């Protein structure tokens, strides 16, 4: 815990003319006696692009410091215009209020400062060289930026640790780098496996695409029944003609029988229609 704590800073003359002095009422608390004084400084930032134009407006040593809450007024002169570029006088800049103990800064308070003309005609058409009598300074006192630093005070116990404390339990744990590397390898293997699966699936699709060519051959086979049907029609026509011849021959045979003429029958097998008799057909069972 810091031996000195800043409690409050109040800007007394705000807004004010550009060349008016700065006035701050500072309240702080001291928890234990100090061997040395506190050094307060006010710095004006002359340019946002270079620290060469920064200038220390004033510094003040406060001490000896009694234990408890302390309050004082810090006054500082306005900045030297010769050290500020003409293009940087108007507009927004920054002032820094700092406090150090034994040349070690432990608190810093930053304020935005806006320098602008009060005359409307000058605001619309500003001259090349600023007219300081018409410039007003406004400090954004409601929103300071406070930064605190841990420093060594009078005792060695108050010195901040230069190195992080030892953590044997944490040192015994597995290195995070190895764990992260293993996770990355697993992810890469999973991606490779997924890519291989996709490639295999695409190969199967190509094989199936080859099967789709079969219907073309099938159509050729389906065309064949037309020829077979045509052939069957011719056979039927021929069979019908044969039946007509058989009927005529039977009629002639009957006539011959009636006339008392006997036909000699050979005991050998009969072949088709050539011998005048039809070929015996086996019985067909229809299911």
Image (cartoon, rainbow, N blue to C red):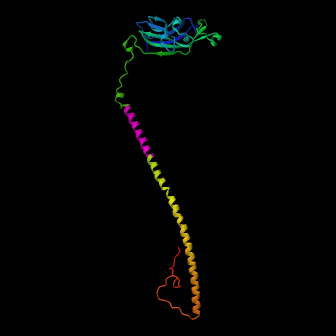
Residue drawn at (48%, 53%) of the image? 209
- Residue 124 placement (x, y as % from top left): 64, 13
- Residue 225 placement (x, y as % from top left): 54, 67
Considering depth in this image, is 75 or 261 the residue closer to the camera?
Answer: 261
Residue furthest to the bottom in view is: 260
The answer to whether 286 is drawn above or below residue 168 in the figure is: below
The answer to whether 107 is drawn above or below residue 287 in the figure is: above
Q: Is residue 112 left or right of residue 153?
A: right
Considering depth in this image, is 137 or 110 the residue closer to the camera?
Answer: 137
Res 213 visible = yes
Residue drawn at (55%, 67%) of the image? 226
Magenta stretch containing residue 190, yes or no?
yes
**Quarter in which the N terminus is drawn:** top left
Considering depth in this image, is 178 or 256 the residue closer to the camera?
Answer: 256
Magenta stretch containing residue 218, yes or no?
no
- Residue 68 placement (x, y as % from top left): 47, 9
Range of magenta residues? 177-198
Considering depth in this image, is 237 or 176 the residue closer to the camera?
Answer: 237
């Amino acid at each position: 815990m810091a031996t000195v704590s800043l409690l409050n800073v109040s800007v007394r003359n705000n807004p004010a003319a550009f060349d008016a002095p700065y006035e701050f009422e500072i309240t702080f608390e001291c928890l234990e006696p100090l061997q040395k004084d506190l050094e307060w400084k006010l710095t004006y930032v002359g340019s946002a692009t270079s620290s060469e134009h920064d200038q220390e407006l004033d510094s003040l040593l406060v001490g000896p410091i009694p234990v408890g809450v302390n309050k004082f007024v810090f006054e500082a002169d306005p900045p030297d215009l010769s050290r500020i570029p003409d293009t940087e006088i108007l507009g927004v800049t920054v002032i820094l209020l700092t406090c150090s103990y034994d040349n070690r800064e432990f608190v810093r308070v930053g304020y935005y400062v806006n320098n602008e003309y009060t005359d409307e005609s000058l605001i619309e058409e500003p001259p090349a060289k600023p007219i300081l009598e018409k410039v007003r300074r406004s400090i954004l006192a409601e929103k300071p930026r406070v930064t605190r630093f841990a420093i060594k005070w009078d005792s060695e116990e108050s010195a901040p640790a230069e190195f992080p404390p030892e953590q044997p339990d944490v040192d015994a744990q597995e290195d995070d780098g190895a764990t992260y590397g293993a996770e990355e390898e697993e992810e890469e293997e999973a991606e490779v496996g997924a890519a291989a699966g996709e490639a295999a699936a695409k190969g199967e699709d190509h094989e199936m695409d080859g099967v789709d060519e079969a219907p073309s051959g099938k159509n050729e086979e389906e065309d064949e029944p037309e020829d077979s049907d045509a052939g069957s029609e011719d056979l039927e026509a021929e069979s019908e003609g044969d039946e007509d011849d058989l009927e005529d021959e039977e009629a002639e045979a009957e006539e011959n029988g009636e006339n008392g003429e006997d036909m000699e029958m050979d005991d050998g097998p009969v072949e088709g229609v050539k011998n005048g008799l039809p070929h015996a057909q086996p019985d067909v069972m229809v299911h």
